[in-house]
Image (cartoon, rainbow, N blue to C red):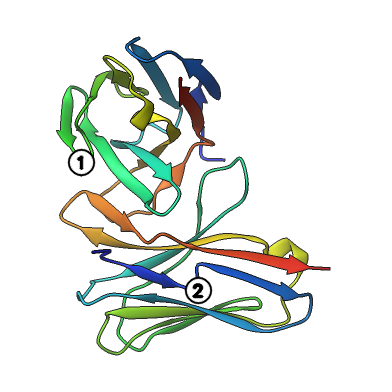
Amino acid sequence: DAGITQSPRHKVTETGTPVTLRCHQTENHRYMYWYRQDPGHGLRLIHYSYGVKDTDKGEVSDGYSVSRSKTEDFLLTLESATSSQTSVYFCAIRGTENSPLHFGNGTRLTVT
Amino acid sequence: TQLLEQSPQFLSIQEGENLTVYCNSSSVFSSLQWYRQEPGEGPVLLVTVVTGGEVKKLKRLTFQFGDARKDSSLHITAAQPGDTGLYLCAGPKGANNLFFGTGTRLTVIP
């Protein structure tokens, strides 16, 4: 593994509650990404970061926010979880724009 | 409309058989990547193809990038149960995104 830890690995929460997922890396890589994976949709980019405090939206960013206050941590927050956000969330990192993505093992989130 | 269409969606074969899965697009990509994902884990990069017509081999896996750089294929020779997994192709979209296809889920039966 490329030194990526996602926490928690599993979470069940109720509609309307806030949820924060954490991605921690030990590779000192510049770029960090949050994807969600759903049947029939593949992996879709939520948000990404290209440096500390530098973030941008992906293709499915509505309802999500992110923060990166230090190189090693990238947090994904669902301000008010909805059932449509039930998914498996993957964090990925890479050192440069052209290097391959290295993924964490995912967080399975269920919103009831 | 999917930027990257993968086919077939599901494939179940016997150990020892050969198979080919496809990744097609109407768009030109500067490169394409193939990943394999096993249950409970994140995708792992298998290969990157960057030149039209390029063929790369990884043991029993052969990857080809189309001449027009709009499609790619993955051929597995003499499939083994360890090849079971979700195979994803992905191509760059913009400066910082990688767009993924929906994948081919392969099951190799012993």
Q: Residue at x 51, y 40 (%)?
A: A2
Taking the image as shown, residue B67 lies to the left or right of residue A52, namely right
Decide: is A64 above or below B94.
above
Q: Amino acid at mark 1?
A: Gly
Decide: is A94 above or below B45.
above
Q: Which residue is mark 2?
A: B8
Taking depth in this image into account, of B33 and A27 the one nearest to the observer is B33
Say which quadrant the N terminus of chain B sits in.
Answer: bottom left
Chain bearing mark 1: A
Decide: is A43 above or below B29.
above
Residue A58 coordinates in the image, percent (x, y): 20, 41
Chain bearing mark 2: B
Q: Which residue is mark 1?
A: A58
User: Which label lies toward us, 2 or 1?
Assistant: 2
Q: Amino acid at mark 2?
A: Pro
* Mark 2, other Cα within 10 Å: few <14 / some 14–19 / many ≥20: some
